[in-house]
Amino acid sequence: VDPYLLLWNTFGGSGYDIACARHNSAILYHLQKQEPRVTEIDFNPSFASSLFFVYLNRKQDSREAIAAYRKKQGNKPDLVQKISSLTRAIAASKQLEEFEVLLLQHEKLISEALEMPAIKETYFPDFEGIVKSLGAWGGDFVLATGPEKAQEYFRKKGYTTVIPYSDMIL
């Protein structure tokens, strides 16, 4: 059974999770004429100690998120091109500051496309680092940047599952 066909004929979605499960490295993923395209990349940034994941315990319904996205109007090919370009630049970042600027640009584009506020402005406006939504907008996990002590900010707000990048990534 082709897992992508099974997904598309039942749940819907991009197939990104399937691609991740099939690779043992970081990947770039996109659909080209309904065909999954996966490129393995080497993403082991020198600033990995400044990256961590925070579990929000706000499981989003991916079906709802996908349906809402598909209803949005706008120039999707242009948006996809911009987001893809930013994604490649993020993956190639050599310095934390550059990475953070690109994450902010990416988050802003997605926020505007979905007509939803960015997760940081909604839940963490006083956090000094960057907070980037992952998965269905504002759902399970966010990626945050900052020194190790910044992780305490989230714990004090009641988010007890804070995982350093090096512990999360295989």
Image (cartoon, rainbow, N blue to C red):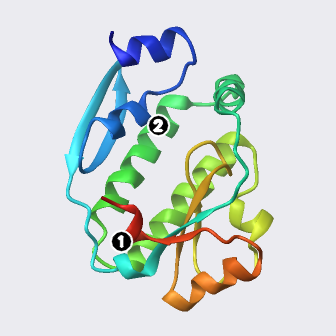
Tell me the amino acid under the disc marked 2. Val
Quadrant for residue 127, please give it: bottom right
Of labels 2 and 1, earlier in sequence is 2
Badge 2: residue crowd in 10 Å (few <14, some 14–19, many ≥20): few
SS at circle 2: helix
**Vertical order, 6 against 139 (above or below):** above
Residue 67 left/right relative to 165 = right
Residue 126 left/right relative to 3 = right
Q: Name the residue located 44 percent from the left edge and 12 percent from the top edge.
A: 6
**Vertical order, 60 against 33 (above or below):** below
- What x and y, as percent, mark residue 99? 41, 71
Residue 140 left/right relative to 22 = right
Q: Residue 44 carries which label?
A: none
- What x and y, as percent, mark residue 158? 76, 73
Q: Name the residue located 68 percent from the left edge and 84 percent from the top edge.
A: 153
Q: Name the residue located 28 percent from the left edge and 29 percent from the top edge.
A: 37
Q: Distance between the residues labelled 2 and 1?
A: 29 Å
Tell me the amino acid under the disc marked 1. Ser
- What x and y, as percent, mark residue 134? 55, 52
Q: Mark 2 points at which residue?
A: 80
Badge 1: residue crowd in 10 Å (few <14, some 14–19, many ≥20): few
SS at circle 1: helix
Q: Which mark is residue 166?
A: 1
Quadrant for residue 108, please give it: bottom right
- Given residues 73 and 155, the one toward you in this image is 155
- Given residues 125 and 56, the one toward you in this image is 56
Quadrant of the drawing holding the C terminus: bottom left
